[in-house]
Image (cartoon, coloured by chain):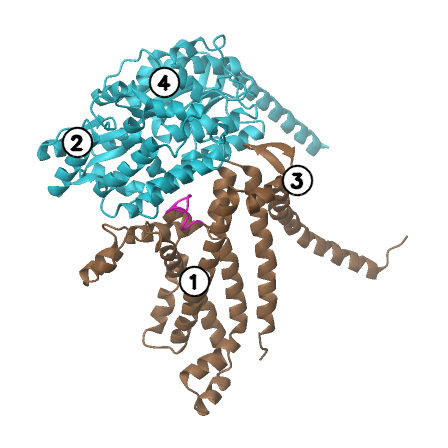
Amino acid sequence: MPVSPKQARTLKHRSWVAFLVLPPIVFMSLFVVYPILSAFAYAFYEWRGLARGEFIGLANFRDVLFGATMAPVVWNAFLNNVQALIALMIIQNGGGFLLAWLLYKEPFGFRFHRVAVFVPVVLSTIIVGFLWKLFLNPNFGLVNQALLSVGLGAFARPWLGDPSTALGALILANAWHFIGFPTLVYLAGMQRIPSEIIEAARLDGTSEWQLLKSIIWPLVAPSTTILFTLLFIGAFNWFEIPYVMAGLDGSPFGNTDVLGLVFYRTAFGNQSASIQNFGEGSALATLIFLFIVVFASMLTLWLRRREIQF
Amino acid sequence: MRELTMKLTRRMMMGVAMGGYLLSAGAAMAKTELTFWSWRQEDKAFYNEIIKKFQEKEPEISVKFETYAPENYQTILSTALAAGRGPDVIQARAYGNLETIAAPGYLLALDKQTVPELANFPEPALAAETLRSDGKVYAVPFATQTMLVIYNKKIFADAGVKPPQTWDELIALSAALKAKNVTPFANGTATAWQNETIVAALLSSMLGKQFEEDIASGKANFTDPRYVNALSKLKDISQYFAPNFIGVDYASSQQLFAAGRAAMFAGGSFEVANFKAQNPALDLGVFASPVAKPGDERLIARYYDGGYAVNAKSDKTDAALKFVRFLATPEYGTAFTNALKNLSPIKGIKIEDPLTQEVAKLADNSMSYLMLVRFRYQEPSGSVLLQSNVQKMLAGQQTPEQAAAEINKGIATYYKPFQK
């Protein structure tokens, strides 16, 4: 059958699109989709080391969620993740919003501060973790030394060893590390707001607080959507800072344990304490993944609805 | 046409070159090359020396020593083995960690026929490398570790104190040191596994061999008064640990001791080589955990680190076995102990270093490093339970009775003798 010029053009166009789209699809399937699916499949088997044993259905999931050994550890870690989420939402995103507002008003030296606030974000998490571990050392760390030197020695404590302060210390270290990111995103959001709106509000004599609450906050909603969703995902995937600063065990006695650490310990074992269980590890990873996908999507949909077009 | 001829000629020339290359490689390949994996990057020079010595005996076999970071070693090794690859000779761990690679059949079982040198090892050393389900030995043990107290002789001499015999003497000497503004123990509890080493280093003599037997037979469990009492003694002595010890991690307590700023370190004999490397001027001594009353048996806690195994899927098992047999000789054990200051379990070795001699002497009277040797096969492992509950107890968040009860509850979920 002869091919018309038009058909030939479409064919050419299609093969061009296919040529562009295929490599990423292959790449994604190979390195993203396949591992996720195989982790999902692994969760249904019994494992001896890395040797796959019998198909055991949902037993691994049951052990992770309700088993006498795993469940208390998993739920304890989950609650720590929730605490981290709430605290970081307030400190990191809330603090970022306020910092962005300060920078938006272009105070003296704002160009310098705009860069300075973002510098920690660029540092490796490993470096930030070790840095804060040194700062928080109970005997020669900067934090306790500073408290002593200003006469607040009574507040000095072994931050990372004290069960009442350990998780908080990790959260603050994390906030210090990442606060530049929400600051910059909010700053960009604020700069996108047409200046007439803000000028009009000022002419009407709004207070600073009203301006912030009723004008700026609703108008940076797209930034909020992104930041809240990313923080939600980050808080439930939290691993590096707890791993570097508190160790694989969530020391002291589970007070800094988070789901990421539990997953790592379970799947790969902890050389100095436990053995590996790949099945339960995969089951936990699958559950974390599903939890994040479902709730992050719901959160995004809800946050999208409050965005305003202008 | 001319182009085609040229192409052909070029191909032929390449083929000849390739063939020549393969032939020459074949001549060199008359030698068998073994690969040998380990997590001991710091011992590389020693192992290359040993390989040279081995080759003097077996010139036909060469060995390539390769290392991976300790925290990833088990994962990399088991991934390679699961893929049907991996090295010919494997430095493996012991107990529960050995089982994760021995149980799926990745390792070659060793016996007195294939490795007659197994006779050079004491029974508990072989037990550490034995799979519980089939009773076969899968690796040649390489080191034994002991939990004891390492002390700074100079600080002791300056303060006019002597190593203690009894627990009361230990308390008195700690108080004397503290009165002189010396930190008695460098130890801290922020790193979870340090709690397990501290328990073994300080409490073994008070627990006693009989306690271990009773645990094994199910006559006693961890709520036994002997265990609870020992834990409460630990709570007493913890006032002499590093200042703010609940926030002091492993690296900081090592630093404290190596810098000569604390008198004692309760931990593993494996620390000695590291302390000496960091501060060669340190004059160190060791003593076993003190006894409750004079006349009781003094014990250290002991375990075996791991061993050298042969990959069951290797196509060079004969050569690999020859190498592993060499690693089981007293000649090797002597070299290992003297070069690495790490005690080899092989009988009849000659130890040069006086401190290692002392450790070896103390090791003659030992009980097991209990949780690793007996309860690190299932979850929650005895180690996980002990580490977190002692950490909690020493932070003042639970009593010794509660800590013991929690440990016991966890182990009883799978340990039959406790379920009666």
Q: Which residue is mark 4?
A: B50
Furthest-bottom residue in view?
A: A204
Instruction: Specify the subunit that label 2 lies on.
Output: B
Q: Secondary structure at mark 1?
A: helix
Q: Residues within 10 Å of mark 1 (few under 14, many from 20)?
A: some
Magenta stretch encompasses residue A254: yes
Q: Are marks 1 and 4 on the same chain?
A: no
Between the residue at mark 4 and the residue at mark 3, the CA separation in whole angstroms equals 49 Å
Give above or below for A19 relative to B139. below
Q: Amino acid at mark 1?
A: Ala
Between the residue at mark 1 and the residue at mark 3, the CA separation in whole angstroms equals 37 Å
Q: Which residue is mark 2?
A: B169
Q: Which residue is mark 3?
A: A57
Q: Closer to the camera: disc 2 or disc 4?
A: 2
Q: Quadrant of the N terminus of chain B?
A: top right
- Horizontal arrangement in the rendering, residue B303 relative to residue A85 (left or right): left
Q: Is there any visible trace of residue B72 in the rendered image? A: no
Q: Closer to the camera: disc 4 or disc 3?
A: 3
Furthest-right residue in view?
A: A1
Q: Secondary structure at mark 2?
A: helix
Q: Which residue is mark 1?
A: A87
Find chain A in the image and tell me its colour: brown
A207 and A223: which one is in front?
Answer: A207
Indicate the chain coloured cyan by its letter.
B
Q: Closer to the camera: disc 1 or disc 3?
A: 3
Question: x, y (%) of residue A203?
Answer: 45, 91
